[in-house]
Image (cartoon, coloured by chain):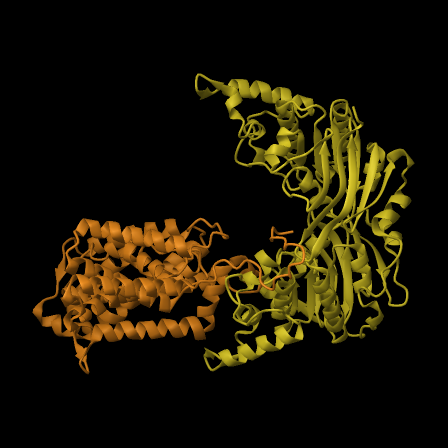
Chain colours: A yellow, B orange
Amino acid sequence: MSENILELNNIVKTFPGVIALKNVSMSVRRNEILGLVGENGAGKSTLMKILIGLYQPDSGEFLLRGEPAMLKDPDSAMRAGIGMVFQEGCMIPNLTVMENIFLSHEENFRKYGLLSRSSMVREANKVLSAVKLHVDPNTLVAELSAADKQMVEIARLLWLLRQYGQENPILILDEPTTVLLREEVQTLFEILTELKKSASIVFISHRLEEVIENTDRIVILKDGEFVKEMPSHEADMARVEGLLVGHGFSDDRYHESDQNEPADEIMLEVKDLVHEGQFAPISFTLRRGEVLSLVGLIGSGKEEVCRCLSGLAPADGGTVAVQGKRAFIRTPKDAIRAGIGYIPVDRRSDGLALDLNVEENINLLVLKKYQTGPFSNLKSEHQNAKFWVKENNIKTPSLRTRTANLSGGNQQKVVLSKWLSSSVKVLIVDHPTRGIDVGAKDEIYRRLRSLSDEGMSIIVMCDTLEEDIGLSHRMIIMKDGAFVREVPCPRSEKPRPVDIIGYVV
Amino acid sequence: MSGEPTPAAGEKKPLLVNRKRQFPAIYFALGLLVLFIVLFSIGNKGFLSAYNVRNIGMSASILLAVGLGQVCTILTGGIDLSVGGLMSLVSVLFMVLLPMVGYWAYPICILVGVFAGYLNGNLLSRVRIPSFIATLGTGGIFVSVAYLISPVAISAPKAIQPLLEIVNGTTFGVRNILIIGALMFVGFLVLERYTIIGRHIFYVGSNVRMSWLSGLNVTRIKNVAFSLSGFGAAVAGIMLASRQYSGYPTIGTVYILNSIATVVVGGTAMTGGAGGALNTLIGAIIMSVLQNGMTVVGIDVYFQQTLLGLLIILSVAVTFDRSKLAIIK
């Protein structure tokens, strides 16, 4: 009996323009807890989705218990003994705990053709005690804490895997500890150690300390490639961090050589901005033409700060001033009026009207500007759109093409054009290159660089530390809702990701 | 990582992805119209007579008026089920007011319609009741108010019949009702293409979250859409009362379904964001041709309902944007 319950050899997976996984090889052994680490975009999610049958690899070998695995969907993966608990949670909030655990498997509790709630309760209690969770199975999931919800999902996964009776099932847990308190993390690892005796666990997490302490082996992915594997007892923070983000700094990938000093004029002044429960009072300034990156893990508060600045959520206190003028921002409209624009991370749901064409999307914010009298001047709108298509190199058959039909990179450029058309002075850019192919990424870097040269002040949050360092003049690191440190990123002396990561995690 | 298909090795990366739904619904609607006209004229030679065509035009004008209002709400992704009740209320109110205030009855009834629509809009945008439910409720209220004003039909006494010439008369040889219909069409077309508020309706219908993020006043836009629906229903109610020389609480009932059919058969998607005045014009003509033609050719009245229902289902199936998977409100 081989030690490897699961083997991936030279797995390749591509999406239009993006190679998500480049010849990744990895194995999962029996009775182990394997830690999987990597930055956003490293390929962890893609790899796991292949394991549970959501994606099919383009090439490579996937062996499960010595046999080639034929997993066409998550259901077949479950039957084969592989299951996953997703980071975002996958339960139905208006059903009870036990109804969620036994969802779609209710036939096990049939008595005389009807559902026997008493046997469900009994079985649910058994399942819940295995994960040391003491809740009434009749509680509505919506009423549970995030931590308890997590444990219910793990309980469900365990029960399902037992149902299918495969030996040494594999549980994949995606960032389970982000919602847990310290004691709860302890409990979780106690349970996992117990579980290890008859199963394998793949543990994905950003919290390197935890991973090193509680796993048997660690696998590190970076940019879709397998970097290294090491026994956890041989690992230390510095070493793992270095491998995670890379030691070097790519030559001019972010056009750093074109980075110019920002002007002195202060465009944005944030003083003691605070949102209860999300981030502590934070203050910073932004000069004309400066690019500031906000860096931090999920829960650091950086996303919430941007939400307050762009009007998606009202802050509880503090002041915001644009070019010296006080701004009261409670809705996106207020933010736009103050001169702050927001390019969302999810361009399809938040950035574009997919039914409408390129021209209509680009002109949304400037309809009033291009009017003759009370009516729209379609000709000037058309000119405006034409200008931006050329300026941002948007590849589209025509201005009247529905934006739904454009590729991701071009859609992103349309969103950018829309905001640049209006007279924003500060642009908040949320993960500008997520899900975008290499060629378009470069164009976006170039564009952001030229924008900052032209005097646009930019706050950016990127997918990787490298991108944050490369694009910005300076960086603010946040952790657990508070300001940690400010790090200058001058053209001549860019800090290395490995030096920064310590403050972030 | 959004599920876009992977191109085969060696294949050039496509400029466009997702080529589905390129076929404009309006061609589908025009095709249907031509088909029906051909079928009915074969079925009955009198179908294309000047007299019959004018009849079709006149009933189309009423459908057009209420349909243009309805399309505004459907474009935002909602629906107005109160148009029938509002038309009935306006017809009764109109007949009551004419003897009392003469020509003032016209602007008063229109204002009542706009206000009723504004009420619907606020129920949706401020009180946050889905438009499907809200307008179902207000429709019932409008009918009740009509009954309160007059439980029986009110006929137009001989004395005030001249006041109905605004709809029933002719100008330069063309029936006024047709002119009003045409004016409404032009008005709504200008609104949807050349005014900001009209175009904002499309943005909201296509992606309401993005609209909000871009600073659009979604509340106001929805209120305007529903006010326009009230306006359309009021005009249609006046037209109907004028033509029938009477107003009664059930005069508009059939228009709840017919206004939606007009919008949908013309190719406007119930999911919002696509379609508009031109589609509604074609839809109104199709509906009118269909109803007139089926009667002229001799199809059983009950079977007519069946055919109409099938047509609606077919039109929605073709135009519905399943990627939105929105529940119709």
**Can residue B67 be seen?**
no
**Can residue B125 be seen?**
yes
Does B44 sit left or right of B283 as displayed?
left
Please report the residue visible at 24 percent of the width from the left and 60 percent of the height from the top: B290
Q: Is residue B49 above or below residue B125?
A: below
Looking at the picture, tell me which residue is in the foreground, A86 or B45. Answer: B45
Q: Is residue B325 above or below residue B231?
A: above
Which percent across, then down, holds residue A7? 76, 35
Looking at the picture, tell me which residue is in the foreground, B33 or A159. Answer: B33
Query: Image quadrant of residue B67?
Result: bottom left
Q: Is residue B159 above or below residue B86?
A: below
Q: Is residue A355 above or below residue A242?
A: below
Does B233 sit left or right of A109 as displayed?
left
Q: Residue lying at the far left in this picture: please name it.
A: B158
Looking at the picture, tell me which residue is in the foreground, A501 or A309. Answer: A501
Query: Image quadrant of residue A365?
Result: bottom right
Query: Image quadrant of residue A54?
Result: top right
Please report the residue visible at 68 percent of the width from the left and 44 percent of the height from the top: A57
Which percent across, then down, holds residue B77? 44, 57
Does A407 sit left or right of B60 as displayed?
right
Q: Residue lying at the far top in this picture: please name it.
A: A112
Which percent across, then down, holds residue A19? 72, 53
Which percent across, then down, holds residue A158? 66, 27
Please report the residue visible at 87 percent of the width from the left and 35 percent of the height from the top: A232
The mark total stands at: 0
